[in-house]
Image (cartoon, rainbow, N blue to C red):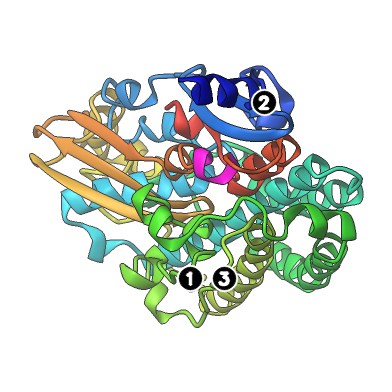
Amino acid sequence: MAEDLHLEEQRPERMTLSIGPHHPATHGVLRVKLELEGETVIKAEPETGFLHTGIEKTAEHLTWNQATTVMDRMDYLAPISNNTGYVMAVEKLLGIEDRIPEKARVTRVILLELNRIASHLVGLGTGGLDYGNIGTPIFWAFELRDRILDIFEHTTGQRMNPSYMRVGGLAYDLPHNFKEMVEDFLKIAPSRIQELKDVMLNNPIFVDRAKGVSVITYEQALRYGLTGRNLRVTGSDYDVRKYYPYLGYENYDFDVPVYTDGDSWSRTAITFDEMFESLKIVRQALDNLPWDDRHIIDDRKLVLPPKQEVKHSMEALIHHFKLVQHGFDVPAGEVYQAIESPRGEIGFYVVSDGGNKPMRVRVRPPSFYAVYSLPVLLEGYMLSDVVGAIATIDPIFGEVDR
């Protein structure tokens, strides 16, 4: 008993510290309750739910195509991924996957990979700030990202949340200079990304603060359900585009970068490698884009008829009226469709009861699993490592609290 009292007296005093939810360094409305001994994190408890928007339930009260407008708002840095995964799930329920025009499929790939690069640039730029004294990357990253958003704006009408994907293809055809805009981006992007990589990964401050810090093993990553870069830095090569190809990804020549250290430096380095692979995919897709093909399926039961046709055909007018007022019915059934978003495997479980609205929409959000792996990444490390660790898992809380 005396020994226990003596040990109690010798134990350093512990302090509880709450970081967030309203703190810019948490990259969103995240609260992390920390238990500290001096500067060392003994225990970390992430808490989410502060941004709950009810996106899944809202989608169940919208028609199948209308739901794309709320899917955009989950991962607001990768809205193209949200839309594509959702409409592919609906297309699978309708049984029309093989009827999607090739132009729409290839365009989806181009926009997905450009969106992946744009999302990664935000994570790298803000992450550089989080590690302190690396202010230059955010300006370089955002300048390059703006060029991608220019392409999105010119193509879809919106820089963010474009709602451009439709069941059966694309909302409208590509602008006449789409290829030229993407070509211009491909000319400058590789050197700009390499420049950004050299500045960040060779920065001695960043190396000292990120190498060997916030390490997670392959077994721990599997236990927490991690996917994407957060899993691939532990030695796994799991990528939905390779393991369960969609949109013809099996026909593209690209590699899946893999690291084995599982630390914050690796999570940053692999992001650069992924951007270079995305550029390779965009190059191949652009070369194979069938310009004269249709941009959406030719099916009057699913797609609005052309305006000229509506003016002269009563049947077309009826189809137009029904699609606008009611939408279209989807056969009863359930489906799970996964794609590789910038943050990992995002999956859409969609259930239809045969009506014009989803009966159930449930999303598998990769950011949710990443946030709840924070105890592994933070415990045993320093308080000063917390913000950097959160930055390298790159969570988006619109997706976590959907």
User: Is residue 73 shown to the viewer in this render?
Assistant: no
Label 3 sits on residue: 259
Q: Is residue 269 left or right of residue 78?
A: right
Secondary structure under badge 2? loop
* Residues tagged 2 and 1 counted as in contact (Cβ below 8 A): no
Instruction: Give above or below for 2 relative to 189.
Output: above
Find disc 2 in the rendering and name its residue: 12
Which numbered circle lies on residue 235? 1
Magenta span: chief secondary structure: helix
Q: In what quadrant of the picture does the N terminus appear?
A: top left
For the residue pair 82 and 203, the one nearer the viewer reads as 203
Q: Amino acid at mark 3?
A: Tyr
Q: Amino acid at mark 1?
A: Gly
Question: Of callouts 2 and 3, which one flags the residue occurring earlier in the amino acid sequence?
Answer: 2
For the residue carrying disc 2, how many other residues have a C-alpha within 10 Å: few (<14), some (14-19), or many (20+)? few
Which quadrant holds residue 10? top right
Please tell me which residue lies in front, 287 or 42.
Answer: 42
Q: Nearer the viewer, residue 291 or 120?
A: 120
Q: Which mark is residue 187?
A: none
- Report the side of 382 relative to 304 (left or right): right
